[in-house]
Image: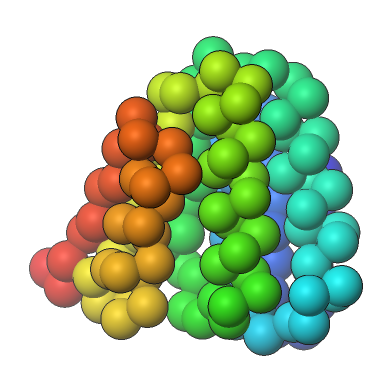
């Protein structure tokens, strides 16, 4: 499962149960549908653990953030609670927006890497 464009790439690696996000996502709400479909397919797998790897995601607009929040709610409703998000403090939007995922999925683990 993969969606890519000139400015971004989102894909799921089943062997590591990880959804990878990279690049800049500056899409309109409707344009997030292919990414939502990938997330829906991941949700349907009912995985015991899941990682969202965002270390290379430089930008995510409000439509994309809402897509992530909706995914977190869907994970909670399905009972998938062992979820880790890997981000970086080097990319400013990630510090606040990724932390807010806890409002929708309180059991989520947020791992932020700094400028090392």
Q: Nearer the viewer, residue 22 or 72?
A: 72
In which quadrant of the rendered image does the N terminus lie?
top right
Inspect this view and state whether residue 31 appears: yes
Residue 35: give x, y in percent of width and height.
77, 57
Quarter occupied by residue 89 = bottom left
Give the colouring mode of the picture.
rainbow
| Image height of 50 relative to 89, above or below | above
Q: Is 81 on the left-hand or right-hand side of 112?
A: right
Is 15 situated above or below 18?
Answer: above
Q: Which residue lies at the image location 56% right of the left edge and 67% below the top edge?
A: 65
Q: Work out which quarter of the rendered image holds the C terminus and state it.
A: bottom left
Residue at image coords 47%, 79%? 58
Residue 30 drawn at (x, y percent): 87, 73
Residue 77 location in percent, x, y? 61, 26
The residue sitting at 30% across, 69% down in the picture is: 96
- The image shows residue 22 at horizontal and vertical percentages of 57, 68
* 107 is higher (above) or lower (below) than 87: above
């Amino acid at each position: 499962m993969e969606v890519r464009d000139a400015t971004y790439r989102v894909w799921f690696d089943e062997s590591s149960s990880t959804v990878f996000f990279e690049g800049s996502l500056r899409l309109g709400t409707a344009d997030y549908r292919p990414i939502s479909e990938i997330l829906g397919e991941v949700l349907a797998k009912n995985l015991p653990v899941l990682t969202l790897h965002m270390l290379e995601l430089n930008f995510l607009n409000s439509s994309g953030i809402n897509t992530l929040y909706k995914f977190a709610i869907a994970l909670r409703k399905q009972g998938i609670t062992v979820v880790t998000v890997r981000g970086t403090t080097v990319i400013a939007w990630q510090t606040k927006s990724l932390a807010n995922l806890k409002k929708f999925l309180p059991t989520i683990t947020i791992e932020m890497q700094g400028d090392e």
